[in-house]
Amino acid sequence: MRVICTISEIREIIREWKKEGFSVGFVPTMGYLHEGHKSLIEKASSENQRVVVSTFVNPTQFGANEDLNKYPRDLERDTNLCEKAGAHIMFVPSADEMYPTTPLTFVNVNILTEGLCGEKRPGHFQGVCSVVTKLFNIITPNRAYFGEKDAQQLAVIRQMVKDLNMDVKIIGCPIIRENDGLAKSSRNTYLSDEERKAALILNKSLKHANELLLEGEKNTEKIIESIKSFIISEPLAKIDYVQIVDSETLKSVDKIEKPVLIAIAVFIGKTRLIDNFTWSN
Ligand code: AMP
């Protein structure tokens, strides 16, 4: 596996791969990789002859008061994980390589970005869509792999690819969790021991919602209120949002009739964590 830092070098390698007729799978990440990322890379490696993983902490998708400067990084660890998972190239551009001049062009997906994380993190999805477009243009993958952990991101990217006729197949991959149920996240590393225990409230509250749904509850307001009171029973937790939306349109629904996404964002201390599940019956 090779670590490549410049756009011109990776383009050259991909040109050679395409000449050979190799299919290319791509996994965009922000690095500090864990088993969740690994599952995406392994899937890419099972479905493509060549696999590129990018690790780029994209400044344009962070808000002014977010964790851009303290986002964890460990290139050596990431390199080992990528190699073991079957990647051929790790693309690790600098911010200057990706943004040599201030960009004046952005990609925006409307409507789907109005609620959930889009509402709480203004500008976030513009940053994501713009950088993913740049990465797609650089890597020209046949397939790109995204986690369902970021369910809104996956829906937004699918829409962008469809609307802009991008020649890449988007593949969603299931959420990978710790043994105790906490969704794996690079940001889990911010948690103290006490916060790590408290963070279990995210998955527990979703399991609780799942039980209500299994019992036949259809009223989303009741389910939301029940999730909220579950979460606030944990003193270290502060709710950012609890929403139940149509799993395709991401619009809020009052009554559960079609598949829905139940999505939450919760601060545990200063760390913002997200989790979700899709319900269809
Ligand atoms: P990130 O590095 O956090 O930007 O994530 C890069 C990709 O990995 C995104 O498509 C995420 O949805 C995906 N991902 C992150 N955590 C997980 C997880 N626990 N399970 C599955 N996919 C994940």
Image (cartoon, grey):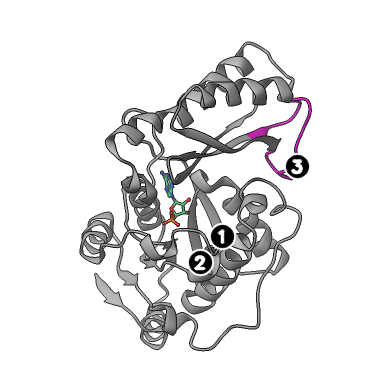
71 horizontally vs 106: left or right: left
Image depth: mark 2 or mark 3 in front: 3
Q: Is residue 94 magenta?
A: no
Establish if 70 lies above or below 60. Answer: above
| Pointer 1 with pointer 3, Cβ within 8 A | no
Numbered mark located on residue 251 in the image:
3
Please tell me whether mark 2 sits on a helix, a strand or a loop. Answer: loop
Instruction: Tell me where the magenta segment starts and ends, as one range.
Output: 246-261
Name the amino acid, label 1: Lys
Where on the picture, by quarter, is residue 52? bottom left
Numbered mark located on residue 142 in the image:
2
Please state the horizontal and vertical placement of residue 84, each as a whole percent of the image.
Answer: 22, 56
Please state the horizontal and vertical placement of residue 11, each as a whole percent of the image.
Answer: 42, 83
Please tell me whether mark 1 sits on a helix, a strand or a loop. Answer: strand
Name the amino acid, label 2: Asn
Give neighbour class at mark 2: few <14, some 14-19, many 20+ (Cα, 10 Å): some
277 horizontally vs 52: left or right: right
Q: Residue at x 36, y 86 (%)?
A: 9
| Pointer 1 with pointer 2, Cβ within 8 A | yes
Q: Quadrant of the N terminus?
A: bottom left
| Residue designated by label 1 | 169
Q: Is residue 178 at all visible to an observer of this figure?
A: no
Q: Compute the Cα span from label 1 to label 3.
A: 24 Å
Q: Seen from this angle, which residue lies furthest top?
A: 215
For marks 1 and 2, the one nearer the N-term is 2
